[in-house]
Image: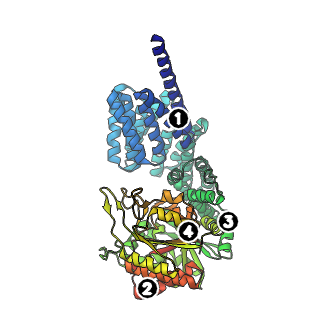
Amino acid sequence: MQTTLTAQAQTTQERKDEALRLNRLGVQQFNKGQFQEALKTFEQALAIVKQIGNTADEGTTLNNIGEIYRNLGEYAKALDFYQQALAIYKQIGDTAGEGTTLNNIGLVYDSQGEYAKALDFYQRVLAIVKQTGNTAVEGKILNNIGSVYVNQGEYAKALDFYQQSLAIYKQIGNTATEGTTLNNIGEVYRNQGEYAKALGFYQQALAIYKQIGGTVGKGTALNNIGFTYNSLARYADAEKTLFAAIEVWESLRTRELPDDQKISIFEKQASTYHLLQRALITQNKTNTALEISERSRARAFIELLASKISGNIDNQQAVKPPNIEQVKQIAKAQNTTLVEYSANESKLYIWVVKPTGKIAFKQVDLNSLNTPLAQLVNKSRLSIGAGGRGIKVEPKNEYTKKQTLQKLHEVLIEPIASLLPTNPDEHVIFIPHESLFLVPFVALQDKDGKYLIEKHTILTAPAIQVLDLTHQQRQKVTGKDVLVMGNPIMPKVGIPPVQLNPLLGAQKEAVTVASLFKTKAITGKDATKAAFKQKLSSAKIIHLATHGLLDDADKSIPSAIALAPTSNDDGLLTPAEIVDLKINAELVVLSACDTGRGTITGDGVIGLSRSLITAGASSVIVSLWAVPDSPTSELMTEFYQQWQKNPDKAAALRNAMLITMKKHPQPRDWAAFTLIGES
């Protein structure tokens, strides 16, 4: 009996040692920026400590996993793991562990801009660590409190807390966090316009990170030095430094990360690309700036799409962004004028690439707007007015449609109007940026009240490189049938679950569209996910007339296409499910509410359109707002009739809009739809 107990004790101790080894390995991987590897390592450690009932180490491991998600910007997941750790530490009376976790929760609120909550958590931790005499943690908390004061613009207080923190780290020889604090002190001086002092602190931080191999810290320090060089008008130095920062960031993104985590990392690093564009443009290197603009957009999307096209979905490789010659070739191959936008707070950069390969550059000073560009875009949407599909109540707003659509035209189109084709049949592809993804380009009005669609045939794309990939995808289209689904028995969504309203206009639309192709629409209870998947692979054209749902509108409702629920599923076809499908279609039309939106990130619009193109569609037509029932049905019917006469999808959509606007002159009724991808 004694022997058995001793063996069990040895086995438990061995398992405990293994968990400790895994946690240490995970921390090393994390410090090198190997987030996915670190996550797997910590999850192995967590399984062991749960199995052997080692509660204290379970708290440590949960905290470590939370740290990964926090650094990836996935704050809800991070909070979940931190709260689990906090409950454990309170249960076992581990004050130090409780302090660490309270600090981590404070960091999450800090990152989300909830500074009062963050300060509350930090002050609670500071009281704990002073009581226990944990100097290292005290230094960390002082640093964090300093950061809150920076965000609130209280620089003297911030500097005081940072200097206390720096003194502690130097005393105990904690080099990595000394680097963090030096970076933070540099930020205070930069925010106060004392650039020479800021540069000195940033360079000290960079030297430390180079010495210890801290990848994220190195990238941050290089970004900050580049920012400061820009502020000092040392643009050549800024260019060199920011290129080095981008190399660091891109080394992180080449790790084997899931698609959503690549996007999350990119969001945190997007400012480096904007700073580099500024440094290049100030030196009149506008073509190189266009390469950086392309290099900064839709990277996770492009890598996923390229791996799908190559048939190597399980082994995504980094895809080289296009150089300027390749950009010219894409414009020539598409025989179209490309218009790429890149916006920061004060400037809008616009490149126009002609089908001849000639590139022109313009920039717009956004300070003269007296309102952020994103706010102007939002005003334009409100001025158009949009209720849910089938709802006729118009929202009240204080903005006139003409004012906002003309103001957007003045900012986005007038600077390049002379560079656009004079023949209305020639294509113009807009590559938006950030909030510009929500702009109804077709409805922008010149001073004479003429809409842009009256002058040009218009498409959009998330990046120039995506056009090259969708062109390759079109060569692989093998479908021959037409799949039309509309007005399914609606699923329930939200918390508590509420059934979506039926779309009677969508029923009529689906039947009419199906009759044009001599096929039968699938509607009502038959319009299920199973029916959709069964007919998917043989479809050349897919038309879905139903609700499109957005997770940015209501976080309790997933982004999805609403189909009929069954005993086996809830009827919600999500982007994650769509990506795993094999679509062989030349065109997918989502004649539904807000299907073209989705969360806006540095990776373009993550939504239903992105998922459908990744799954194999060479082009997608989606809506930018909730579209009224009757005009939508008429516009869609007209689109297909036009397309049967002319194989150019963009021309067919333009003609359908021009015809629809005669009967329904309000842009809300005809301007929502946009064609993404191949024409």
Nearest the viewer among 649 and 342 is 649
In primary-sequence order, the first of circles 1 and 4 is 1
Secondary structure under the numbered disc 2 in the rendered image? helix
In three-dimensional space, the C-alpha distance between marks 4 and 3, rounded to whole angstroms, equals 18 Å
Can I make out residue 444 in this image?
A: no
In primary-sequence order, the first of circles 3 and 1 is 1
Q: Amino acid at mark 2?
A: Met
Whole-percent x, y for residue 503 in the image: 36, 73
Left or right of 668 in this view: 578:
right
Q: Which mark is residue 623?
A: none
Nearest the viewer among 465 and 49 is 49
Q: Amino acid at mark 3?
A: Ile
| Front disc: 4 or 3 | 4
In three-dimensional space, the C-alpha distance between marks 4 and 2, rounded to whole angstroms, equals 24 Å
Q: Amino acid at mark 1?
A: Val
Which of the 4 quarters of the picture holds residue 350?
bottom right
Whole-percent x, y for residue 642 in the image: 53, 84
In primary-sequence order, the first of circles 4 and 2 is 4
Secondary structure under the numbered disc 3 in the rendered image? helix
Residue under pointer 2: 661
Q: Are marks 1 and 2 in contact (CB under 8 Å)?
A: no
Residue under pointer 4: 461
Q: Residues within 10 Å of mark 4 (few under 14, many from 20)?
A: many
Q: Residue at x 36, y 56 (%)?
A: 556
Whole-percent x, y for residue 375 in the image: 40, 67
Residue under pointer 3: 324
Q: Image quadrant for the C terminus?
A: bottom right
